[in-house]
Image (tube, grey):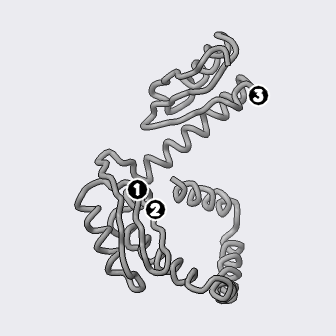
Amino acid sequence: MRKTFVLLAALGVLGGCSEQQINNAGSAVESAAPKIAGEIESAAPGLFNDAVVETRIESQFLQIDAASALHVAVTTHAGQVKLSGKVRSTAFEQRFIAAAKGTSGVKGVSASLAVDPHLQGTVQQASDFGLVAAVRANLATQAGLNAVTIGVAASHGVVTLSGNIKTPALRSTLVATAQKTAGVKRVVDRLVLGG
C-alpha cells in the first residue's frame, strides 16, 4: 500500500511538470546520489549495502508478479533479509524466496508470506484509491467539517463509510452522497450514531 501511495504521489507531483523540469530533477538526483550514498555509508556502515540489496530484491519481485510485489515488505539488516506480507499464490511465494536468496549480498532469508489469491493488482488499487478520493471530496462538499472524521474505504466499487456521527440526518446525507459518486456500486454503512 505504501508503495502504491508513493507511486501515485510521485505521479501527481511530476504530472504538473514539463519534460525539461523532470529531466533536470532527474539529473540533480543522479549527480547528488554518490555524495548522499557516501554520507549514508560513513554514518551507518552497511546501511547503504542493505538498501541496495532491498532495491535489487524489490526489482526482481516486480518482474515476477507486480501485484504481489506491492504487498510484500522487504527488510534487510547486515545481509539478513526478511520478507513479510501477501502474495497471490504459493508459486509466487516460492519464486520470491528463491529470487531473494539468489540476490548478491544476501546472507540469509526468512519469509512470513500469506497466500491470498484475491490480492488486488496495481490497476485495481489505483482505481480504489481514486474512488476514495472522489467520495471524500463529495462528502466534504456536502457535509463540510462533519465529513473530516468519516473513514472511507473502497474495494472494487464497494465503498465503506465508518466513524461516529451526531444525527440520523447526517448519516442520510453521507450515505446518499457516497452513493451518487461516479464509480460507486454499493455503500456499506458502518456509521455509529451518537459519537
- Between 78 and 90, which is closer to the camera in this rendering? 78
Give me the disc on residue 22. none
Q: Residue furthest right?
A: 145
Instruction: Point out the residue furthest to the left here.
Output: 91
Q: Which of 108/19 is in front?
A: 108
Circle 2 residues within 10 Å: few <14, some 14–19, many ≥20:
some
Q: Residue at x 66, y 63 (%)?
A: 14
Between disc 1 and disc 3, the foreground one is 1
Residue 2: x %, y % from top left:
54, 56
**Tag 3's secondary structure?**
helix
Q: Quadrant of the C terminus?
A: top right
* Depicted 103 relative to depicted 68: above or below: below
Label 1 Cα crowd, 10 Å radius (few <14 / some 14-19 / many 20+):
some
For marks 2 and 3, the one nearer the N-term is 2
| Disc 3 target residue | 145
Could you tell me the amino acid type at mark 1? Gly
Q: Is residue 98 above or below residue 152?
A: below
Q: CA distance from mark 2 to mark 3?
A: 35 Å
**SS class of the residue under badge 1?**
strand
Would you name the residue on which mark 2 appears?
Answer: 73
Q: Earlier in the sequence, mark 1 or mark 3?
A: 1
Residue kind at label 3, given as amino acid type: Leu
Q: How far, Cα to Cα, is label 1 from label 3?
A: 35 Å
Between marks 2 and 3 in the image, the one whose residue lies nearer the viewer: 2
Task: Give the label on residue 85, or none.
Answer: 1
Circle 1/circle 3 CB separation < 8 Å: no
Q: Are marks 1 and 2 in contact (CB under 8 Å)?
A: yes
Q: Quadrant of residue 60?
A: bottom left
- Mark 2 residue type: Ala
Residue 83 x, y percent position in the rendering: 40, 64
| Residue drawn 31% across the image and 48% down it | 116
